[in-house]
Image (cartoon, helix red, strand yellow):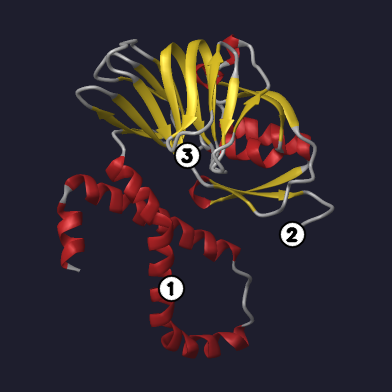
Amino acid sequence: MAAYRHWVADAHHHAVFQHELKLWRSLSVIGEHLAPREPVGQRAARRRRQGLFAASGLAAAACLAAFLIGPDVWMRLHADHRTGSEIRAFTLADGTQAVLDADAAIAVHYGAYTRTVELLRGRVWFDVRHDPEHPFRVEAAGSVTEDIGTAFEVDYRVTGGVETTVESGVVRVSGRAGGQSIILTAGQRALWQHTGQITRQADVAAYRVASWRDGQLVLTAVPVNVVIAAIARYRSGLTLVVDHLDDLPPVTAMVDLRKPDDALNALAAGAHLRLYHLPGNTVLVRRSGGKKT
């Protein structure tokens, strides 16, 4: 408890705690709205059981809160730059331009001889100030993208893979442990996986690289659940998918990220999904019919 008091005494940490507390209170409100009505005859018995289960329920809730909130608190404490539902641009100490997509975070580690940026979450685009004597590297999971004078995007996917796409110039993609490496030029992409394997992906038009910087997301044959996750980055509330959507046809579209709720509504109409709007700007996504979980 003493450690907690010391931690929360910091103004930044206190703000983090209050934000997460607000989130959990909103979730409790959601639970009230989703709970079925109980017959009057059963309420008295339920109240008698409440005292017995209160302590264990609070303990379980505390454990769940620590499990879910913990990683985000860690991210806030370790990231030098991070975003919520917005896109933000930063100029790093060496003049390199970095544009963070929504729900992204980076830690900057510049030393006497190297420039390393650690991508902790999400997607970021760099326009690197070239300096051969101080190599610029982006590390994400076990992957390394090294600049050879370029502008490029690195996407640390929720699945654990890391995709690098080059807008201009040349980069080298490799693993931290060495092994396979690959050179990419403008319009080329490569996907690093935890196995250490690096595979070339389909080329893209250079002008489409990191199109999210301009508020647009270009999708070509993308699974519905991946599209929902992409749109959710730009919403101010939670977006929860409660059914399996893997068997739905992939989506090809251009999404206006400045209006994420409109984009979600359009996707729901096209993919035959139903959206349930709950307090706290939370949206539940379900299939409108047919196979469900």
Between label 3 and label 2, give the one nearer the viewer.
2
User: Which class describes the residues within 10 Å of circle 2: few (<14), some (14-19), or many (20+)?
Assistant: few
Give the mark nearest the N terminus, 1 or 2: 1
The earlier-in-sequence mark between 3 and 1 is 1
Q: Which residue is mark 1?
A: 60
Pointer 1: residues within 10 angstroms few (<14), some, or many (20+)? Answer: few
- Quickly name the residue at label 3: 236
Residue beneath disc 2: 293
**Dividing the image into 4 quarters, which one contains the C terminus?**
bottom right
Q: Which residue shows up at 40% across the image and 27% down it? A: 138
As helix, strand or loop, the secondary structure at mark 3 comes to loop
Which element carries disc 1, helix, strand or loop? helix
Say left or right for 96 vs 45: left
| Residue 103 in view (yes/no) | no
Q: Is residue 191 above or below residue 246?
A: above
The answer to whether the residue labelled 3 contacts the one labelled 2, judged by CB atoms less than 8 Å apart, is: no
Image position of 125 (left or right of 289): left
Quadrant of the drawing holding the N terminus: bottom left
Is residue 131 found left or right of 266 in the rendered image?
A: left
Q: Is residue 78 above or below residue 206?
A: below
Work out how far the residue at label 3 is from the one at label 1, CA to CA, in angstroms.
Answer: 27 Å
Amino acid found under the numbered disc labelled 2: Thr
Q: Residues under labels 3 and 2: Cα distance?
A: 27 Å
Relative image position of residue 135 (x, y in whole percent): 33, 19
Q: Name the one closer to the observer, 140 or 284.
A: 140
The amino acid beneath tag 3 is: Ser
Q: Amino acid at mark 1?
A: Ala
